[in-house]
Image (spheres, helix red, strand yellow):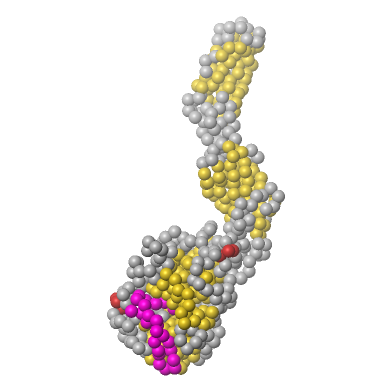
Amino acid sequence: MKKSQRFRRVTGAALAVALGSAGLAAVGTPAAYAATPSDEAAKLPIHSFGAMVVDDAHERVYVTDGNKSGNGPSAVLVYNFQGQRIGSLATDEPASGMALSADGATLQVSQSNRILAFDTATQTRTGAASTPYDVTCGREVAVAGGKTWFTETPYSGSSYCDRPDNQALLYGVSGTSSFNAGWDSRGRLKLESGPGAPDRLVVGQAGTNNSANAFLATFDASGANLVRGPQRRFADAEGKGALDLKDIAQSADGKRIAVADAAYGTRLLDASDLADAPAGYQSLPTGAKASAVAFSGDGKYVARGADASGSVSDLLIQPADPADGTTPMEFAFEGELDGSRVVPQGLGWAKDGSRLFAVTTDSYSHWLHVIKPPAAQYDSRFAGTLTTTPSKPVVGEPLGIRGKLELDGPAPAEPVKVEAVRKDADGTTEVAAAKVAADGSFTVLDVPDRLGEATYTLRFLGDVTHRPAEDVTLTVDVAKAATALEVTAPAEATRAGGVEITGKLTGQGRALPSGIALKVTRTDRFGTTGELTSASVAADGTFRIRDLPSKKGRTVYAVSYEGDDLHSGSSAQATVKITG
């Protein structure tokens, strides 16, 4: 087992789930976070995945391999809540689906020819119910209305299991036998039940081709027979938007049903009629396809798994209520040590929300991750007013925006950062994030590249122990960069020998343009001013002026630069006494 350090938090799309002062203007509602997560990962000794069940009463996690090879004994792998393997439950044939009884006392396990029952306290087999078919396609198993329900795909040959024209049947368990529930479809069926609505069974159609309009339906399992409730198909009149079902979850209070739809993302539905909930979850990261979804038993969190490549996030954890506007915590599983994506139906929570269990794969190997979303949540805020150095920003010159961030609760384990964006006439530009010092001070550095008004928005997106702060803004007027002229002239000169003046033009911000010509004037002791030939500025900023004055006495030479699009003008003068 190893500890993964690959989780990362990103804007808008990280609850580790961490679920305006004077002079500061708010520009958005911050997302919610929670505190310190950890991720322990154990490599599973399986090459395929069937199901996972979390047993809170005994703090165990059961995993089946869903082996479709068809022959030979198998086992249900048993792990503790720390991710350590502590045993196994033997089955006679390959095992696939599982479900826990409402009281947690019995684990129902589907093997290819029976539904087995295990006592969760003693880990011993206590019974078995017959099934109508000996299948290699695996089964879904769920407990609703106090009864066990399972799916049948009555075909042999694992390559045939996911054909869209397969018949899928729904059965119930009665003692040591099973009975046909009277519902069937084409394509595989997925089942879901939950403690928030113990009599409700959710059935979804999966394994269909892209053109099929897959359904989702709920059933009341409280009576002797299933009674169908709301149902829904998702394609529009043009056949677009059809469901590509990977997983189903019911909220802790039973009012919402979430669906992992590989074609759409995470759908959040009203359980009463399967209509879209008034507010849904934000989209998964670009390139990620929904593969799993699970609500924590305490009602606080939802986890959304995905099939994504590279550094694109495969797992998002956030408050279950989408109205919180949270920024999820995101995990990107990459490489040979922790898998590359979350498997369909590969998420499960401890009832109190203290742990999330996630199964990942790289197509061959599988891992069990034990993720601990933190419980404590602390506020953060920007305090006081923002100041700038220099006080008047200039184009092309470094600008420091200074402020202070206050963090409640314990100090962060690692320095946190303040992020910033600049908005001007050219659009919005991301500015490099600034580390926050131990005393809360920070300096965001930028080099504005356009004249005129620029608005900076500063954000603290939260860390693993702090909620995000309310965004603040600062608007500045970016001026032209200053220039300076220096001239060196002799104190005295003769009319015959002439006057030679040297100098240098310097500028702040962007480099001065080439080919600059300086204006030069001469004013004699009688007050007569005349313009001389302009002085050319060399690449290093130096220039030279030569003149043959016609009058004796005090003579003033003035040199000026009119400026350019990014630089202000400047001037300098020198006084020379002309003799002889």
The picture places residue 96, in percent across and down from the top left corner, at: 39, 82
Which of the pair 549/135 is nearer the observer?
Answer: 135
Q: Quadrant of residue 547?
A: top right
On whether residue 171 falls in the magenta region, the answer is yes
Residue shown at the point (58%, 55%) measured from the top left: 417
The picture places residue 184, in percent across and down from the top left corner, at: 37, 80
Q: Quadrant of residue 532?
A: top right
Residue shown at the point (55%, 19%) measured from the top left: 519
Which of the pair 539/271 is nearer the observer?
Answer: 271
Name the side, left or right, on which 261 lies relative to 8. left
On whether residue 429 falls in the magenta region, the answer is no
Q: Magenta residues?
A: 167-191
The picture places residue 540, in percent across and down from the top left corner, at: 50, 29
Where is 56 relative to 443, above or below? below
The picture places residue 399, in percent across and down from the top left corner, at: 59, 42
Name the side, left or right, on which 247 lies relative to 209. right
Which of the pair 32/309 is nearer the observer?
Answer: 32
* Outermost top residue: 580
Quadrant where the C terminus lies?
A: top right
Q: Is residue 121 visible?
A: yes
Which of the pair 372/440 is nearer the observer?
Answer: 372
Residue shown at the point (35%, 71%) measured from the top left: 208
Q: Is residue 344 visible?
A: no
Q: Main secondary structure of the magenta part?
A: strand
